Image (spheres, grey):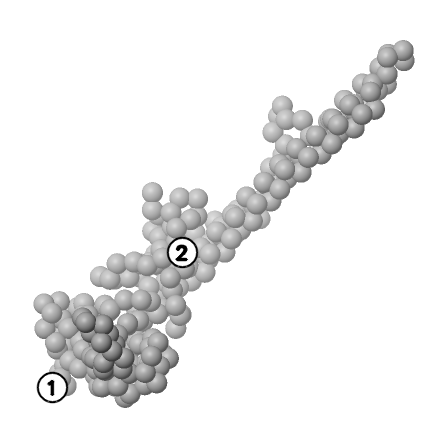
């Protein structure tokens, strides 16, 4: 079951995590023998053994070795569980602190809000020219275009002021950001390399609306207004 963590809930959730980290270790469950109990029993066994038929030293050493190995494995498992819980708690604390902040993720979509500027990035693996950012509304119509300078590759940053091609503010809502550019040595349908206009990858900055966490503190997900969600580990950059 997914438990949403929004801005108002994150404080109490963080407090609960901290309380869990500060709680005292659990005592040994009743009925479970510890290494100390084992050695106590062994000492009594040696004290009460038949002098004419003493305990075999090799068998005794084997019992001690088995006990030590069993406890070592149990302790290792406990430490791994504690480590996993600590990692989960730290990740949850980090994720909850992102509510209300902008993060860069792999998406073509953005929610326009009047008066706010939107920004993104084109991660280019190769040189490109005649690059244009096209903004489409939910019907697929192009409402605006942002020309970009040629690039030799790398991260190409861009911004959109939320206005159409005539400089008028567009209505609030969901928009698709597409980038196209002229790239050299692109194979056509016949495998011939030539310069072609192709669609380029786009990454957008969008605001985190809430955080969801799966069972046992796993599966942290960032949620965005009208844009769905992404996994916490898929965040590229935090603004």
Asked whether residue 116 appears in the rendered view, the answer is no
Depth check, front residue: 211 or 132? 132
Residue 173 lies, in percent from the top left, at 17, 68
Quarter of the C terminus within the rendering: bottom left
Residue 65, which numbered label? none
Asked whether residue 220 appears in the rendered view, the answer is yes
Circle 1 residues within 10 Å: few <14, some 14–19, many ≥20: few
Displayed quadrant of residue 224: bottom left
Quarter of the N terminus within the rendering: top left
Q: Upstream in the sequence, badge 2 or badge 1?
A: 2
Where is mark 2, residue-wise?
Answer: 10
Where is mark 1, residue-wise?
Answer: 166
Q: Secondary structure at mark 1?
A: loop
- Does 214 sit above or below residue 114? above
Distance between the alpha carbons at the discs numbered 2 and 1: 42 Å
Depth check, front residue: 58 or 157? 58
Label pair 2/1, CB-CB below 8 angstroms: no
Q: Is residue 46 left or right of residue 28?
A: right
Depth check, front residue: 76 or 197? 197
- Does 195 sit above or below residue 20? below
């Amino acid at each position: 079951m997914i438990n949403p963590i929004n801005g108002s809930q994150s404080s109490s959730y963080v407090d609960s995590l901290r309380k869990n980290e500060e709680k005292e270790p659990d005592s040994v469950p009743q009925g479970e023998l510890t290494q100390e109990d084992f050695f106590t029993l062994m000492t009594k066994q040696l004290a009460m053994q038949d002098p004419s038929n003493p305990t075999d030293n090799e068998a005794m050493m084997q019992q001690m070795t088995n006990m030590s190995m069993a406890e070592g494995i149990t302790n290792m498992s406990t430490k791994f569980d504690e480590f996993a819980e600590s990692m989960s708690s730290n990740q949850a604390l980090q994720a909850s602190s992102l509510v209300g902040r902008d993060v860069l993720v792999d998406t073509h979509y953005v929610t326009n809000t009047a008066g706010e500027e939107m920004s993104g990035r084109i991660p280019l693996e190769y040189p490109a020219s005649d690059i244009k950012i096209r903004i489409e509304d939910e019907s697929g119509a192009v409402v605006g275009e942002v020309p970009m300078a040629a690039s030799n590759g790398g991260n190409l940053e861009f911004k959109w002021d939320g206005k159409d091609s005539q400089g008028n503010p567009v209505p609030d809502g969901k928009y698709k950001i597409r980038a196209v550019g002229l790239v050299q040595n692109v194979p056509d349908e016949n495998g011939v390399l030539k310069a072609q206009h192709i669609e380029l990858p786009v990454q957008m900055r969008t605001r985190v609306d809430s955080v969801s966490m799966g069972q046992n503190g796993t599966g942290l997900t960032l949620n965005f207004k009208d844009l769905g969600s992404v996994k916490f580990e898929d965040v590229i950059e935090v603004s």
